Image (cartoon, helix red, strand yellow):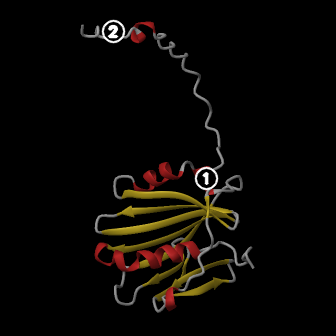
Amino acid sequence: PPAAPPAESSAEGSAEPPAAPAEAPEPLPKVYVKVVGEETAVSRTKMGGLLEPYNDVGKGWRINKPSGWNQFDTLPGVYEMKWEDLVATNREVLLVTTTPVKSTTTSVDMLGDVTEVGRKLGKGKKELLSAKAVEKEGILFYMWEFKTEDGHQLLQLCVNKGKLWSVDASAPDKRWSKVSELYTNSLLSFMPTLKSSAN
């Protein structure tokens, strides 16, 4: 005779009912959670001569800047240093800027989560493509890539010496594939100190 069909599983009936949700706790005051960035080496590549070292001894920072680009010295309140591609004037730009921060702001993660901060920075005008936290020589950096209306932007922020340091690199879409690696290495070479802990 055919085997009797298996008895209906009674597991559903005997499963414990889901626990009633606990009462929502009082919202906690915003707690600062230290972000641990991905340990990343300071880039030292010169990309076969496409990048060259630049040190600002007076203000104490360093970067590998694009070789042969026009350099514009400090414009107070606007930028510390600006480099523009000679060929694509005003279209391929690398900017280093600083903004004073409160003495209690000692790390960029005090601004919030890297993705949240990126969304705020791009709000309405730019699409956030990527966000990551990296640590170079003991300093935490937030790095983002944005899609702008007609191009791309890489942005990196860190806090050091009472300042929020920003390195901002942008280019039109048609040039992005040519400069994105150059920009990434330049941003990864930036440090708001002259002395390398690796030396």
Residue furthest left in the image: 1
Q: Reply above or below: 149 against 31.
A: below
The amino acid on which the numbered mark 1 sits, given as a three-letter code, is Asp
Residue at figure coordinates x 42%, y 78% from the top left? 93
* Viewer-proximal residue among 197 and 118: 197
Residue 159 in picture, x, y percent from top left = 64, 62
Would residue 155 be found to the left or right of residue 107 on screen? Answer: left
Q: Write down the residue under mark 2.
A: 8
Q: Is residue 50 shown left or right of residue 134?
A: left
Quadrant location, the C terminus = bottom right
Dot label at residue 109:
1
Location of residue 13 with respect to 129 vertically, above or below: above
Q: Nearer the viewer, residue 82 or 147?
A: 147
Quarter assignment of residue 108: bottom right
* SS label for mark 1: helix
Q: Are marks 1 and 2 in contact (CB under 8 Å)?
A: no
| Identity, as a three-letter code, of the amino acid under mark 2 | Glu
Q: Quadrant of the N terminus?
A: top left
Front-lying residue, 96 or 142: 142
Q: Earlier in the sequence, mark 1 or mark 2?
A: 2
User: As displayed, is residue 100 above or below residue 109?
Assistant: below
Q: Residue 116 location, x and y as percent?
A: 48, 48
